[in-house]
Image: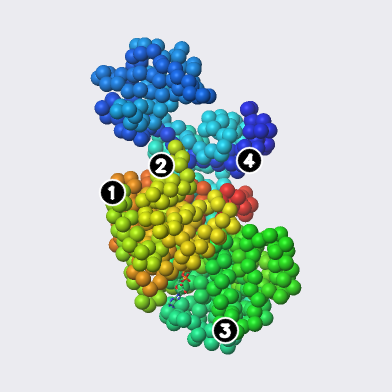
Amino acid sequence: MRLNEINGIGEKTEKIFYRAGIEKVEDLLTYYPRYYDTFEEPVLVRNLECDRTQAIYATVVRNVEVKRIRNLQIITGYLRDSEGYALRAVWFNSAYLKGKLHIGDTFVFRGFVKESRGGFEISQPKIYGIREYNKKMGEMQPVYSLVSGMTNNIVQKAIKQAFNLTEPTENIPKSVKEKFNLIDKSVAIKAIHYPKNYEDMQLARNRLIFDEFFYFIITLRNLKEKNDITVNENKLEEPKEITDLINNLPFKLTNAQLRTWNEIKEDIASDRVMNRLVQGDVGSGKTILAVLLVLTAALNGKQGAIMAPTEVLARQHFEFVTELIIKNNLNLNVAILVGSLTAKEKRLAYEKIESGETDIVIGTHAVIQDKVHFKDLAVAVTDEQHRFGVRQREMISEKGNHPHIMVMSATPIPRTLAIIMYGDLDISVIDELPAGRKPIANCVVGTEYRPKAYNFIEKQVDSGRQVYIICPTVEYSEAVEGENVIEYSEKLNKILHPGIKIEYLHGRMKPSEKNEIMGRFARNEIQVLVSTTVVEVGVNVPNATVMMVENAERFGLAQLHQLRGRVGRGQYQSYCIFINGSGKKDAEKRLEILNKSNDGFFIANEDLKLRGPGDFFGVRQSGDFEFKLGDIMNDADVLKDAAMAVDLVEKGKLPVSDEEKKILKDIQCNSINI
Ligand code: ADP
Ligand code: MG
């Protein structure tokens, strides 16, 4: 049903909604709230806390003051609470308030409280009558993600109407619902938008997460069935050049790497096509295995491709492969295929890939574009698999003549969950780091530690090393607390001594800018790189020895572990400084897990133990399996239930009617980005 069926949505608003991914009326129902605003008990002035949204019950004691600064009209209200303590309220461009706020009137004012000119100031508070506020107090108001031009109010109104126009269909068999105590789909969807209370919302959330996982697992099972019967049309033997190349490497492969390489070799020579996940902690040396595999394909006269999630990473792999080919005098052509190539460069690359002149392609998503036709693709590797979806895995396997698929992941998830999440793949684990690595020294500290940290950073740079500093956001925003890359690097420029070159990096920069900055960092032309988590994935600069993470409490442990993996990649002792910007004890407890161990799998398991129910507005833990609501770590119990449910249905232990079977078949996992 088209969006313009909804009152108040015309062509213009429709376009805005499209940008938020809402294309039809039905999509509104699954546009779940990001969180809920709860109306807290009003407090007294002496109990106010700065830099938080609070409600205060106060009386107007003077007429409002109106000032004008250029286009901006500033209205100041003077208020007192029941104990006689004063505070100010400030609004912008809200002239109508003059008629609303009379001396002696008492209201509830709810807004962001700041300290200003020695007193408290509440900024742009909403004004409620006392009875009106009391009624709201227990309620949970849904807050939605917005794109520019959208307001929470518009979304709320649209969703209200959508419920009158369409109804969600039940998509889980009745027997499963009963067995796992799930509420109805339509009840759940209603309650996720308008929960009566916390428990109500929990039940709804539980049900909807179950759906996401259930259908994810069903999709995987279907894939596995397909894989299991796919005949290997690209039987590959290890050429002699590979043995020589391994012997010529500047390092000795670890036992875990050798074991995995043997598993891969067995797969590609067998009767069935390979579908293998190589899971190994950051720095365990997965890249070389991907490279050995594509070289093997190329030396067998076929083609190989490696797909990485970022251009920076793709270029790094490209350089690594090129170097190996030159060093070992191999007569092979490697091409890079990334978004920032010019149209002409791309066209040329497509031609060479199609004609077979290119033996190995390394790139980003650009590799699976429709325009790319391989002559004889025999192996396809995706690095940092969690950044790609199952869908993309399928797309690449459709590119050639049933190529062997290898996916690599450093997301340390406990084995019990890995078996569920990668149900269609065989798993190799690289559970050993190269010898001679010095364990990273960690600390979890408060913001008061910063001066010491900066001192330490200067010393490291003076001795030739480099530093990453991670901030959670790109630029200042009132809505999000925490340090931002742009202001932080400005600040740092004033603090660190002038000989130190500082630059910043974030995901909103153009790929060419990002490449340029990463390139300069790799060549040590930049010593301190202030960045968002874009450096999280796989980047390799062995000279970098310090990773400092601001607002570490805002990140999942898996993500922090990935970030930490950017250092400790060379011969130098490396350090990781996690700054707990919240000062909160529970955040510290969680971060301490990182302090205890450098082993990603241990961390993931501990993290899983620490989680209690209701932790879910916090950070996502699992890296990047992009479910709408579910998080495989936070919601591990639901995930296990869903896996069990799929098992029971497949084994016929839970009855499914013909009609239900049809629904199961039809589900395309549309709502889930897998
Ligand atoms: P990841 O598993 O995180 O992708 P990489 O493949 O990027 O790790 O390897 C990290 C670093 O370790 C690279 O500089 C790589 O050359 C090096 N390396 C890989 N295998 C070994 C080994 N067996 N011994 C020593 N260094 C190795
Ligand atoms: Mg890697």
- 239 sits to left or right of 45: right
Q: Mark 2 and mark 4: span between their CA atoms?
A: 28 Å
- 346 sits to left or right of 160: right
* Residue indicated by mark 1: 448
Residue at image point 33% right, 55% down = 454
First in sequence, mark 3 or 4: give its number.
4
Q: Nearer the viewer, mark 3 or mark 4?
A: 3
* Residue indicated by mark 3: 328
* Residue indicated by mark 4: 18
Q: Mark 2 and mark 1: span between their CA atoms?
A: 18 Å
Q: Mark 4 and mark 1: span between their CA atoms?
A: 45 Å
- 119 sits to left or right of 131: left
Q: Position of residue 4 (x, y in %)?
A: 67, 32
Q: Mark 3 and mark 4: span between their CA atoms?
A: 52 Å
Q: Are marks 4 and 1 in contact (CB under 8 Å)?
A: no
Q: Mark 3 and mark 2: span between their CA atoms?
A: 52 Å
Say what amino acid the circle numbered 2 marks: Glu
Q: What element does badge 4 sit on? A: helix
Q: Which mark is residue 481?
A: 2
Q: What element does badge 2 sit on? A: loop
Q: Mark 3 and mark 1: span between their CA atoms?
A: 52 Å
Taking 256 as reference, is 666 above or below it? above
| Residue 129 figure quarter | top left
Q: Position of residue 140 (x, y in %)?
A: 42, 33
First in sequence, mark 3 or 1: give its number.
3
Say what amino acid the circle numbered 3 marks: Asn
Mark 2: few/some/many CA within 10 Å (<14, 14-19, 20+): some
Residue at image point 43% right, 41% down = 480
Q: Nearer the viewer, mark 2 or mark 1?
A: 1
In the orientation shown, which residue stands out farthest toward the front? 498
Q: Are marks 2 and 1 in contact (CB under 8 Å)?
A: no
